[in-house]
Amino acid sequence: MYFIGYDIGSSSIKAALLNAETGVCVATATCPEKEMVIEVPHAEWAEQDPESWWQEIVNATGILLNRFTVDPALIKGIGIAYQMHGLVCVDKQQQVLRPAIIWCDSRAVGIGNNAFKALGESYCLEHLLNSPGNFTASKLRWIQENEPHIYERIHKVMLPGDFIAMKLTGEACTTISGLSEGTFWDFEENAVSKALLKHYNIDENLLSAIVPTFGVQGQLTAAAAATLKLAPGTPVTYRAGDQPNNAFSLNVLQPGEAATTAGTSGVVYAVHDKNSFDRQSRVNTFVHVNNDDAHTRNGVLMCLNGTGIANSWLKNLVGDITYPEMNNLAQQAPAGSKGLQVFPFGNGAERIFENRNLGATLKNLDFNRHSRTHIMRAVQEGIVFGLNYGMDIMAEMDLNIHRVRAGHANMFLSPLFREAFANTANVVIELYNTDGAQGAARGAAVGAGYVTAADAFRGMECLAVIEPEAALQSQYRDVYGNWLNGLRNLMQ
């Protein structure tokens, strides 16, 4: 039996084909070859065409089936992971009405902040576990206020993963976890938040029907099956946002366990068994994939928007260089990069700063002392320090993280990044041979009832363990302290 997992990111679409009997991923694909375009029609906006995600799903599926010959009838389920907090609007014919407003778009910050005050901070934090902030509900309100001609034609609103599921099955549906990431979910009432919808004047009928995270969510239509060259009726059996899914893909399911990723954005995600919140909503709580009525399982998430995108920006600026070459050059500079500091906050409003957009800053540059090696190291250190700043906030919620799991991918391919992360945060890092697409495929196998959650991770291996070292900890503690002083000056 085989299962397909799709991971719909803002940079690329990844696909994986999993042999569920062995737990081994037999084929992978990433499309397109170059990073997908994020349109920025106005400052602090970020949009993508949802149909481009679908086209890359088609392309990636074709590559999978070319790389591994399999009878489509043996593919027993499809899992979907997706970039969180986006907004897709479709009409009654399931046609997209406007480009998707994606996760790093900041246009709705003011709307969410006003709702936080109008609804009351106590209500928002105790019921939504978050400020409405810049999440999906606030983005929908922005459309209502600024594009009424679009709003009046909306039949359903959905997250990016909901849209792909609709393209596969023809059905508009979502999950409780997905509703929570849009701040539509009332944790106290265990239902859609009537108060938030009333405040925003949003008709609840615009929300899609709720389906379980694991389980049959619809079947592949004949048209979609013909396009993908898969079997009609193949069920979609799992769906989750990229960060809950990343945690699942790393078998992070129980209280006290934590996952991290450093792709376009950087995230630390810890599982909690309480409806907890940060008073300033600098880190956010969402429903985790294995939450149920008997066992509260929430994911507390800190996000740094300017992570891999900062490194990508530097790569494009330098030109004619690979990421491994950049990693090697970065290691040639000393810790602290001779005083050069990077504050990688140039990708929209950052939640860890209460939805402020500080912009990116390069500080203490000395033309006589600093070369590209120092800049490359300072970028990686700045990303690590931003993530650690978020982990300090999580510690205030009694989430004291001592061990994190990550896929052997993206920034974690850099030995320097791993060293800086482990020693700044004083955590043990476990690196695994998995990614979001493989996680989605494993989730599909669980959702189809083919394997249990306990057996879903056969074939996954720990590739490396990075432990903090006393001498390096002292060194990074000093460098991080200097970086924090620089950050405080920026925030004044």
Image (cartoon, rainbow, N blue to C red):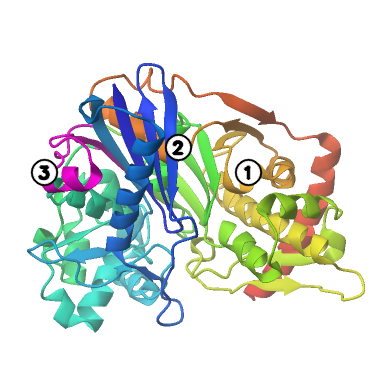
Residue wearing tag 1: 412
Which mark's residue is nearer the viewer, 1 or 2?
A: 1
Mark 2: amino acid: Ala
Residue 274 quadrant: top left
Question: Are the residues tagged 3 and 2 within 8 Å (C-beta)?
Answer: no
Alpha carbon distance from label 1 to label 2: 15 Å
Mark 2, other Cα within 10 Å: few <14 / some 14–19 / many ≥20: many
The span from disc 3 to disc 2 (Cα, nearest Å) is: 33 Å
> Which residue is denoted by mark 3 in the rendering?
222
- At label 3, which amino acid type do we have? Ala
Provide the secondary structure element on which disc 3 rests.
helix
Q: Are marks 3 and 1 in contact (CB under 8 Å)?
A: no
Q: Which quadrant would the C terminus be assigned to in this image? A: bottom right
Tell me the kind of residue under disc 1: Phe
40 horizontally vs 176: left or right:
right
What residue appears at the point 41 percent right and 53 percent down from the top-left corner?
A: 9
